Image: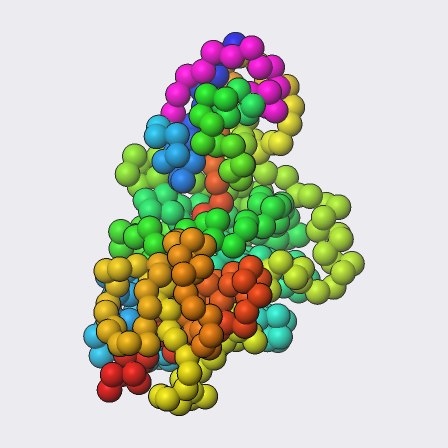
Amino acid sequence: MIRYKRHIALNEVGVKGQSKINNSSVLVVGSGGLGSPIIEYLSRAGVGVIGIIDFDNVELSNLHRQILFSEDDLNKNKAICAQEYIKRINSSIKINTYSEALTIKNGSRLIQQYDIIVDGTDDVKIRYLLNDFCVLLDKPLVYAALYKFEGQISVFNYKKGPTYRCLFPVTPKDNELPNCSQTGILGVVPGLLGIYQANEVLKIILDIGEVLTGKVLNINLLRNTHTTFRFSKNVMEVDKLIKKGVPYSDSISFINSDYTISLNSLKKNDNCIFIDVRNEDEEPIIKHKKIHHIPLGKLKDEFLNIVKDKKIIFFCSSGKRSIKAAVFTNKNFNIHSFSLKEGALMLNKWING
Amino acid sequence: MEYTVRYYGQIAELVDRSEEFIFSEADTIEKLIMDLIQTHPILKGKTFQVAQNNQIKREGALISKDVIDLFPQFSGG
């Protein structure tokens, strides 16, 4: 208990509180910008079991904010690298890693094993999926999301309180909300928000203070403003979901779906083209006759110019934007296009290596 | 009536300000939003939440000096 001496010294924690922390289990979904500080602080605090879900690999452009990773981790799975890092900080806790995406298939099995669920994702569909599972399995969901220098933090479904769908009942259209790779992000912003989330987790475990339930805290880090909005539970909608018994279909992520294709199933002489949907300045810049470039934001207009007599495979860094491109073109152009599972770095090695 | 309207995230960028004072005849949230869309046509069709004096609401009566917040959903992480 020497490790936790400064915790125990707090009247609000004490030996009893620290023991609550040590006996708790927390599932962190996503170990990137938000997930990194959440995982680091919760493991230092002594949370007994931490689950980490992340299908993504570490990239150079992650290192300015994802503090669990170093240059040695490039191209390795984030959940596994996070576990390696945490082992050196606190070997007395258990870390479970899941190198996969959270999906409709595995969600229930993974979430039900933990006391508290933390949203460290950057995908709004996954946020709805997490919400629905947490309502169905009666778990509190600690949420944060950000846009440039601003963030929102809340705790959903805490003691059957208001949920993510009570705050945002209308699911946004594809591409309506920009992500960090499109808008950019100052490294400290997810760091601060992730620490707020870790703080809410500890308050829930210790049963101290006021948990951010039925409230969303909006922080603007350029203007140093903190604004809290109160919102109510939509009892009818929550009951409808519980009665339905499974997450709504608008929350289903397309990751690992029929639209995904792997380099392992392709041959170099296949009749296909690759469309890079990253921004112009994103590395690695890949030059090859089979590669075209249309940033995701311009896809609607410029995709018309692509000759569609070949298999069309979209790619980006992690697969998030390319899956959006594949879903959009499948729906709107009556073709069967794909999203590349491996991303730009691996494609560059495969095609030019 | 006089209102303080505050904007957040992408909505603040669209209207190019984070706060403004509005004089309006509108006496309900719905009417005030219509007024704001007339002043800032770029808001038309955009999805955002509305709070009256820090309570999220979709409709209801307003009184002068109310503080109205318009904030969108964020997705980054």
Q: Is residue A199 above or below residue A212?
A: below
Q: Quadrant of residue A121?
A: bottom left
Name the residue at 66% across, 43% down: A233
Of A201 and A238, nearer the camera is A238
Residue A126 is left or right of residue A121, and the answer is right
Q: Quadrant of residue A60?
A: bottom left
Q: Is residue B20 magenta?
A: yes
Q: Is residue A88 visible?
A: no
Residue A190 is left or right of residue A229, and the answer is left
Q: Position of residue A207 (x, y in %)?
A: 53, 53
Name the residue at 62% across, 31% down: B58
Numbered marks: total: 0
Name the residue at 66% across, 52% down: A160
Q: Is residue A348 visible?
A: yes
Of A112 and B14, nearer the camera is B14
Residue A76 is left or right of residue A72, and the answer is right
Q: Is residue A164 above or below residue A264?
A: above
Of A274 and A199, nearer the camera is A274
Q: How is the image coloured?
A: rainbow
Q: Position of residue A234 (x, y in %)?
A: 69, 43
Q: Is residue A316 magenta?
A: no
Q: Position of residue A204 (x, y in %)?
A: 52, 55
Residue B35 is left or right of residue A165, and the answer is left
Q: Quadrant of the N terminus of chain A?
A: bottom left
Q: Position of residue A141 (x, y in %)?
A: 55, 57
Point out the stretch of residues depicted in magenta: B19-32
Of B11 and B60, nearer the camera is B11
Name the residue at 75% across, 52% down: A239
